Amino acid sequence: MKKLTAQQRLFLRAGSVINDFERNNFKVSADVASRAEELKPQLLYMVRYDKSFRFEAELFLNGLVLATKQAKGQDVLAEFKAVCERINAALEARC
């Protein structure tokens, strides 16, 4: 099995948190919310400095931001679902 890059591991963790939000109807524990907050600066760094993964990092960052907003009671579900579809499409294109 091929070893994952640091970027791929970060995307895997971000995708896992996004799935946790969605699976639990945006009612998540403090642990999931804190994991989302921990990942945001790392993804933002990639958006700014990693040209090869900038697009995907931006999509995951948007997904985490929208999931957090939805969990806090803002109605951004349609936008969240659209971002999730774009994430899936981007990952399929990379494979």
Image (spheres, helix red, strand yellow):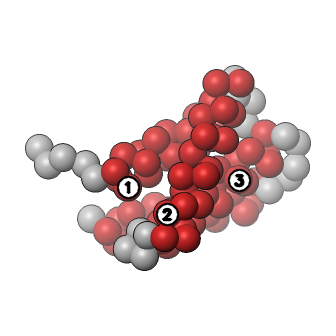
The mark nearer the N terminus, 2 or 1, is 1
Q: Note whether 34 is above or below 65 in the view shown.
A: above
Report whether residue 95 is seen: yes
Asked whether the residues under the numbered discs 2 and 1 touch, taking CB atoms below 8 Å apart as contact, a structural biologist would say yes
Residue at left offset 43%, top offset 70%: 50
Residue 50 vertical placement versus 9 (above, below): below
Residue 7 is marked as 1
The percent coordinates of residue 13 (x first, y second) are: 46, 41
Which one is earlier in the sequence, the residue at label 3 or at label 2?
2
Please give the name of the residue rendered at 60% of the width and 34% of the height, measured from the top-left corner: 35
Question: Residue flagged by tag 1: what amino acid is it?
Answer: Gln
Between 85 and 4, the residue placed more toward the observer is 4
- Residue 60 visible in the displayed image: no
User: How many numbered marks, from 0 up?
Assistant: 3
Residue 65 marker: 3
CA distance separating discs 3 and 1: 19 Å
The quarter of the rendered structure image containing the N terminus is top left
Q: Residue at x 39, y 63 (%)?
A: 91
The answer to whether residue 39 is above or below residue 35 is below
Give the structural element (helix, strand or loop) at label 3.
helix
Q: Amino acid at mark 3?
A: Val
Q: Nearer the viewer, mark 3 or mark 2?
A: 2
Disc number for residue 46: 2
